[in-house]
Image: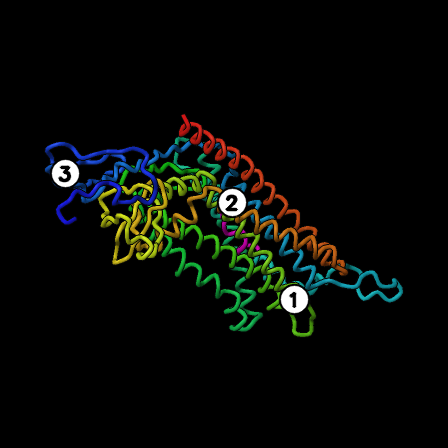
């Protein structure tokens, strides 16, 4: 009836409430628990009932973030040396593919006495390619030698001498190689040589530094060994925006560096060979893909260490997620107008931009219509998702290389695949070790939270 009392049975929840809470006597507004931060409106008087059931009846489960173990990470110089070593192996096997000979022919009329045509190799181009591949190692050594702490006079002299020797040797070798290449090859060849590296500096590095300079110091200074950002210090949505920007630029760093290395390893050497010389084009394209994928995996593990991924996971857990639902299916369910001032509990329905959304996380402060918030929660809600993706990619690459090794009939393919496999084995071992340790840590955290809920 129009003037009758509507009991709580006429309103339904997205899930069964864990406890019951009524309105405060004599007050027109009742404030929910500080966990939800949502107010429910009631009407005073005995002749009226609840026009909006209290959201405090839907308990928000407190989040507990356990510490993950400290996993050993390579120092910057050791990591760059390992990455350069893998690149030099790939470059070496490509030169085998290009300049191989048939040295096993009968000794009476041998076409060559060596396994490679060393006289056809352009060593100035080789020096330039090596410097480009070693650019990250050179930068890391110079930064390490630029230590500004309290050091003795002898250590300061050693650091200055190291920087001077590295920069002078690199600059002299680079200038000498470029002068020779300018005298030998056409402008088109030189444009092909410098095009990706010329695009890398103005359009990525400068923009990258300017973008990261706008980030808060707690986010912009997060390195492979530093993840000291405290979730909950500011508003959560602002923290997520900064973390999202930082993560996007780390991914761009991985993709661009991997593409640049694969380009100089697989494409540059074959562009400068003579037109009368034969080489396996299929193998060059296959090497480009293998180097690009392997470099992406190695750099991703370095730039997205477990501590950083755990930081993203915590931010996603506090951000929450909304799932769009059909309004016709929830016509009889209570729907609240969404407000950015509140932290919404799990299972509640809200209206936003003429659509209905359901809260999926324990905490939900994300904007329902923001697709970037949904993607952030999807990728980082599971703390091991990135690590699992890297393991799957590296496992597929190793399986393909093993299959190609079994099917290979040429000696240079066998040597090439065998050498490249060793670098992939090392990366796969580190990924698998991190997965086992972190899997046990997160499973222990989940079982601990389940036991506390039962208690």
| Mark 2, other Cα within 10 Å: few <14 / some 14–19 / many ≥20 | many
Q: Residue at x 58, y 56 (%)?
A: 291
Mark 3 and mark 2: Cα distance apart in space: 48 Å
Q: Which of 362/230 is in front? A: 362
Q: Which of 247/82 is in front? A: 247
Residue 239 seen: no
Report which residue position mark 3 lands on: 29
Quarter of the picture containing the C terminus is top left
Tell me where residue 111 appears, x and y as whole percent: 81, 66
Q: With respect to residue 136, does 30 lie above or below?
A: above
| Callout in the foreground (3, 2) | 3
| Callout in the foreground (3, 1) | 3
Residue at the outermost top position: 455
**Left of 355 or right of it: where is 394?**
right
Which quadrant holds residue 100? bottom right
Tell me where residue 367 appears, x and y as whole percent: 29, 51
Magenta region:
130-138
| Callout in the foreground (1, 2) | 2
**Magenta includes 365?**
no
The label on residue 139 is none
Report which residue position mark 1 lands on: 282
Mark 1 and mark 2: Cα distance apart in space: 31 Å
- At numbered mark 2, what does the secondary structure look like: helix, strand or loop? helix
- Label located before the other in sequence (3 or 1): 3
**Left of 376 or right of it: where is 384?**
right
């Amino acid at each position: 009836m129009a003037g009758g009392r509507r009991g709580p049975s006429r309103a339904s929840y997205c899930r069964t409430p864990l406890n019951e809470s009524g309105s405060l006597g004599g007050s027109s507004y009742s404030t929910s628990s500080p966990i939800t931060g949502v107010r429910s409106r009631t009407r005073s008087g005995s002749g009226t009932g609840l026009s909006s059931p209290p959201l405090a009846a839907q308990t928000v489960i407190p989040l507990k973030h356990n510490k993950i173990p400290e996993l050993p990470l390579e120092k910057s110089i050791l990591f760059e040396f390992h990455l350069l070593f893998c690149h030099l192996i790939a470059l070496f096997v490509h030169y085998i593919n290009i300049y191989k000979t048939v040295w096993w022919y009968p000794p009476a009329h041998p076409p060559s006495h060596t396994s490679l045509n060393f006289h056809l190799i352009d060593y100035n181009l080789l020096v330039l390619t090596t410097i480009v591949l070693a650019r990250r190692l050179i930068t890391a050594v110079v930064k390490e030698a630029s230590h500004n702490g309290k050091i003795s006079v002898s250590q300061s002299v050693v650091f200055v001498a190291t920087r001077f020797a590295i920069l002078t040797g690199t600059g002299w070798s680079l200038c000498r190689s470029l002068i020779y290449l300018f005298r030998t090859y056409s402008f088109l060849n030189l444009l092909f040589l410098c095009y990706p590296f010329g695009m890398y500096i103005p359009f990525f590095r400068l923009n990258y530094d300017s973008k990261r300079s706008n980030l808060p110091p707690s986010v912009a200074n997060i390195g492979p060994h530093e993840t000291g950002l405290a979730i909950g210090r500011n508003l959560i949505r602002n923290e997520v925006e900064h973390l999202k920007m930082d993560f996007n630029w780390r991914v761009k760093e991985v993709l661009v560096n991997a593409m640049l290395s694969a380009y100089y390893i697989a494409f540059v050497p074959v562009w400068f060979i003579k037109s009368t010389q034969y080489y396996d084009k299929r193998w060059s394209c296959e090497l480009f893909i293998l180097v690009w994928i392997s470099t992406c995996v190695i750099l991703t593990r370095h730039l997205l260490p477990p501590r950083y991924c755990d930081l993203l996971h915590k931010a996603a857990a506090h951000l929450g997620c909304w799932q769009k639902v059909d309004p016709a299916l929830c016509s009889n369910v209570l729907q609240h107008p969404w407000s950015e001032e509140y932290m919404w509990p799990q299972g509640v329905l809200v209206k936003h931009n003429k659509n209905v959304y359901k809260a999926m996380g324990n905490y939900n402060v994300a904007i329902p219509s923001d697709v970037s918030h949904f993607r952030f929660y999807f990728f980082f809600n599971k703390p091991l998702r990135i690590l699992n993706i890297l393991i799957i990619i590296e496992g597929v690459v190793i399986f393909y290389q093993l299959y190609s090794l079994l099917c290979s009939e040429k000696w240079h393919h066998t040597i090439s695949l065998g050498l490249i496999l060793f670098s992939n084995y090392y990366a796969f071992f580190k990924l698998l070790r991190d997965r086992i340790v972190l899997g046990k840590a997160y499973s222990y955290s989940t079982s601990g939270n389940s036991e506390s809920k039962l208690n």
